[in-house]
């Protein structure tokens, strides 16, 4: 464990925490532009989080400890994930604690707790949202695992920094399997982050909500943490996608301090492009019926499995 | 994969696209999109044949690539579009099995054919032998599509897609069949399509529908 490693770990973690709300703000702004609306401020998510932190929290009657602790657990899980995913550098001391499979487990942990908390208070919308979240989750998770397995098969390791190191230094060649995995990963990210073809993050209609229905009862600092965790989740998924499919510009262990400083602007540019692309996808597509979601995620799973099979067939 | 030459990489890419298109056809609900997907498959097939021809210097493969473009991208899709217009069968087609189940069965078929092809492709000596499994998988998937569809038109498209898969298998395993055989197959497909087209009108006249379950009845009245 070197000093440079610890520095890159801390810097990456700080950037993830600080920039995650900005990414959400950027996506919202791009979407407003594309839809010919006047855009909200880029920093609106920060204002919302600050406003929520100074308010007094109200907890529903009969809420158990699960309801109270869930925001901290969810936020903690997303912070752990932000420390594992190599977004700036691959020399991360903390990333040795967990590989790609454990990362999927972290996301699952957050999902289970938020669904439990939604059902804890016993409102109809909470239970409805929790059930839908589980419907989406049980289909999205295997697809995400298959995408990560494809990357692991190509690089020969399930540790994320090793995968990214291999990908960043490979020769230029056409990988059909990675193209399939990329499309599958995009579809999974859309579903996991409650984005438009599956869920609408800006909806005010409770009947169509998935993620929003689960957090209806939260207020003040609890809600602030959940919003921040949601932003971090989007940030993490974007970083996984960038690290797997566009790994250029990430600082490697032997590159030293200067590479770390160079990696930050590259990451921001890549995230800005990715956020714009997300806004384009959300503008171009319409929200599906909830019962079409299994088909959508089934396609993602199919693509991810095909990626693995094609890699086995053509790669040897 | 970086060790193999660029043309082989391109052929691998086209093979992957071919497999993807086979799955897209399997799960497609609209007849019109099905025809367009079939035309796209023809483009992928023709391009890969042309690349194999360029890489190996076999002149007759250029001819068969040209034939693929003329027949499977131009004439047959046009003929199918014309049939759809004349028969007025633009509506959605529901399969016998729902879409996610069909996809899962498709994945099983792909695993099966990859396993089967792994043994065969070791005997082949061509650069493109790795794509043999994909060719077999797309034959299987087209076969599955013929089984799961109830209407006559998607079944015929499935049959044509199966021929695409076989053609791709021939190019990838042995650099194409002799010219005479290829010409014969192309003519067969064309004539078959004509006869089937005439059949469609007959079936519709008899039963007022292209649903093939009517053909299962042997007697006029129950």
Image: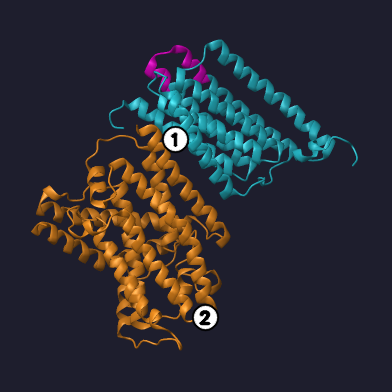
Chain colours: A orange, B cyan
Please state which of residues B192 and A157 is positioned toward the viewer in this rendering.
Answer: A157
Crowding near the residue tagged with mark 2, few <14, some 14–19, many ≥20 C-alpha atoms within 10 Å: some
Q: Give above or below for A177 relative to A64.
A: above
Q: Residue furthest right?
A: B221
Q: Please tell me how many numbered marks the rendered image carries.
A: 2
B63 in the magenta segment = yes
**Do the residues at discs 2 and 1 belong to one chain?**
no
At which x and y percent is residue A272? 30, 57
Q: Secondary structure at mark 1?
A: helix
Q: Give above or below for A164 relative to A8.
A: above
- The quadrant of the rendering that contains the N terminus of chain A is bottom left
At which x and y percent is residue A110? 37, 68
Please state which of residues A177 and A62 is positioned toward the viewer in this rendering.
Answer: A62
Q: Secondary structure at mark 2?
A: loop
Identified at 41% across, 86% down, the residue is A59
Q: Which residue is mark 1?
A: B16
Q: Give above or below for B97 relative to A213.
A: above
Residue A123: give its label. Answer: 2
Visible residue check, residue A44 = no
At which x and y percent is residue A123? 52, 80
Magenta stretch in the rendered image = B51-66
What chain does badge 2 belong to?
A
Residue B182 is drawn in which quadrant?
top right
At which x and y percent is residue A92? 18, 57
């Amino acid at each position: 464990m070197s000093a440079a490693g610890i520095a890159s770990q801390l810097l990456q973690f700080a950037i993830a925490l600080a920039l995650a709300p900005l990414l959400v703000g950027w996506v919202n702004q791009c979407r407003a532009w594309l839809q010919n609306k006047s855009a909200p401020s880029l920093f609106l998510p920060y204002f919302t989080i600050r406003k929520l932190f100074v308010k007094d929290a109200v907890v529903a009657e009969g809420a158990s400890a699960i309801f109270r602790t869930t925001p901290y657990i969810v936020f903690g899980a997303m912070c752990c994930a932000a420390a594992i995913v190599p977004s700036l550098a691959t020399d991360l001391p903390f990333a040795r604690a967990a590989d790609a499979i454990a990362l999927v487990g972290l996301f699952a942990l957050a999902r289970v707790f938020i669904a439990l908390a939604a059902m804890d208070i016993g409102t109809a919308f909470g239970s409805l949202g929790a059930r839908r979240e589980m419907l989406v989750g049980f289909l999205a998770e295997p697809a995400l695992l298959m995408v990560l397995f494809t990357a692991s098969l190509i690089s020969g390791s399930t540790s994320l920094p090793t995968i990214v190191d291999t990908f960043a230094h490979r020769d230029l060649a056409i990988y059909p399997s990675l193209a399939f995995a990329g499309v599958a990963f995009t579809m999974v990210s859309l579903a996991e982050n409650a984005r438009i073809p599956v869920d609408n993050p800006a909806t005010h209609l409770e009947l169509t909500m998935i993620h929003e229905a689960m957090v209806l009862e939260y207020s003040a600092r609890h809600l602030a943490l959940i919003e921040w965790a949601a932003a971090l989740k989007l940030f993490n998924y974007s970083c996984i996608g960038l690290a797997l499919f566009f790994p250029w510009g990430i600082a490697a262990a032997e590159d030293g301090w200067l590479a770390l400083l160079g990696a930050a602007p590259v990451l921001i540019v890549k995230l800005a492009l990715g956020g714009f692309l997300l806004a384009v996808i959300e503008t171009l597509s319409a929200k599906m019926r909830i019962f079409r979601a299994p088909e959508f995620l089934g396609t993602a799973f199919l693509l991810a499995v095909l990626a693995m099979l094609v890699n086995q067939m053509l790669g040897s | 994969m970086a060790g193999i030459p660029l043309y082989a990489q391109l052929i691998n890419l086209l093979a992957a696209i071919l497999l993807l298109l086979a799955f897209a056809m399997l799960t497609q609900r609209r007849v019109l999109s099905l025809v367009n997907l079939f035309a796209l498959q023809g483009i992928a097939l023709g391009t890969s044949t042309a690349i194999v021809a360029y890489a190996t210097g076999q002149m007759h493969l250029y001819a068969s690539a040209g034939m693929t473009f003329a027949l499977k991208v131009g004439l047959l899709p046009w003929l199918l579009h014309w049939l759809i217009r004349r028969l007025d069968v633009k509506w959605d087609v529901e399969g016998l099995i729902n879409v996610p189940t069909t996809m899962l069965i498709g994945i099983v078929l792909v695993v099966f054919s990859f396993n089967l092809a792994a043994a065969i492709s070791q005997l082949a000596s061509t650069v493109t032998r790795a794509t043999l499994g994909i060719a077999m998988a797309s034959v299987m998937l087209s076969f599955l599509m013929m089984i799961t569809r109830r209407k006559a038109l998607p079944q015929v498209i499935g049959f044509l897609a199966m021929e695409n898969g076989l053609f791709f298998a021939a190019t990838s395993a042995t650099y194409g069949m002799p010219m005479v055989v290829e010409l014969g197959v192309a003519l067969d497909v064309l004539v078959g399509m004509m006869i089937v087209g005439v059949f469609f009108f007959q079936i519709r006249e008899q039963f007022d529908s292209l649903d093939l379950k009517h053909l299962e009845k042997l007697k006029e009245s129950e």
